[in-house]
Amino acid sequence: MSLAAQPARPDVLILLHDLRGGGAERAMLRLAGGMAAAGRRVHLLLVSAQGDYLSEIPPAVTMSDLGGGSVFGAIPAIAKALKTYQPRAFLAALTHVNVAAIIAAALAGYRGRLVVSERNQISAKAAAAKSLREKITYAVAPWAYARTDGIVAVSDGVAKDLITFARLPAEIVHYVHNPVYDAGLAVRGEAPAPHPWLEDGGAPVIIAVGRLHEQKDFATLLAGFFELRATRPARLIIFGEGPERQALERLISGSAFAADVALPGFCTNPFAAMSRAAMLVLSSRWEGFPNVLVEAMSCGAAVAATDCPSGPQEILDGGRYGPLVKVGDASGLAMAMSAVLDNPDAGPIAAERAKVFSVERAAASYLEILRA
């Protein structure tokens, strides 16, 4: 374990497992930067200092590495860090990290303010749990969450789901939309395109960004795209990696339009794609607060999404800033994509909406809940 020297007691200590590519990790880094910009001392505690986002730790945020391993195996080290740093507030994110943080705080006799962040529809995640560790985590979560000073959900839908699932009093559950919009996104959008289709002047390029996992339902997106492609020229790039790759590749290879679909893998700078794409599509079965939707809007991309629980309805204001489609409806996605491609005002309208989900606003809300 490596605990960095801390010249002053942190106002906020943030716990994450690592900084591998994920919406939650990127959102928490933005939040840390927003808190630091508001004048707070913020320290990031990583179980394992690895991942694509290590380079994105804000300069004003200090960091410690606990040396790797599982978050549950790191509970004694987390407790030691709490005793060492004695932060005024302790914040964790993601269910398994939250449970470990709550146990570590109890072991350390921590007396500061303990808040955790729930990032997704916890009932859907619990129902989809396969491993014994996952099942135990979701079984313990209601007991653990009741022992915090507050839980922050990333959307109203996630908050309501959490209250029901964990049988929590509504007064300790808050919702704060993820910090997404800032001027830096537009700058990163000017970087070189991550795929040649995005700058070759050919048919419009539709993109999707996310883990190749059943939650994202890229199979329905492919079906919708093939239906769209039968009526007009278009191309589709799905950026991401995951366990569904082979299944998706089979679906693509069996289509007459296979040449118009690409699966290039994980993209470290999706903003360079978002700023050039004709539109982004979110096809998920469930979400918490899909950062990728607001990120694309911030980069000027038009969007369409499934009306999944939770987030798209709130982000797009019931469809005002981009069409909402029933989950699993391939034909509905095809029609939504066609309508967006035919609307030259869709991107600018979405870009204006993205400003609502600013880093500054989210940081201020978290600091109020943390009382930091």
Image (cartoon, rainbow, N blue to C red):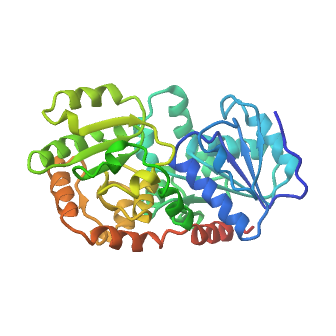
Q: Nearer the viewer, residue 216 or 308?
A: 216
Please determine whether, in this image, residue 236 is positioned above or below residue 350. above
Q: Residue furthest left?
A: 231
Q: Residue at x 66, y 36 (%)?
A: 50
Is residue 150 in view from this perspective? no
Where is residue 325? Give x, y as percent. 23, 57
Task: Work out whether 262 lies above or below 94.
Answer: above
> Relative to residue 234, is residue 316 drawn left or right?
right
Residue 206 % position (x, y)? 28, 51
Pick whichever, 253 or 362, lies toward us. 253
Q: Quadrant of the N terminus?
A: top right
Whether residue 276 is visible to the viewer of this picture, yes or no, is yes
* Residue plotted at (29% across, 40% down): 218
**In the depicted view, which residue is nearer to us: 356 or 169?**
356
Total marks shown come to 0
Horizontal and vertical percent for residue 128?
40, 36
Residue 273 placed where, x, y %?
Answer: 40, 51
Is 110 placed above or below 294 here? above
Viewer-proximal residue among 238 and 14: 238
Q: Residue at x 51, y 49 (%)?
A: 23
Relative height, residue 155 to residue 256 (above, below): below
Q: Residue furthest front?
A: 200
**Quadrant in the picture for the C terminus:** bottom right
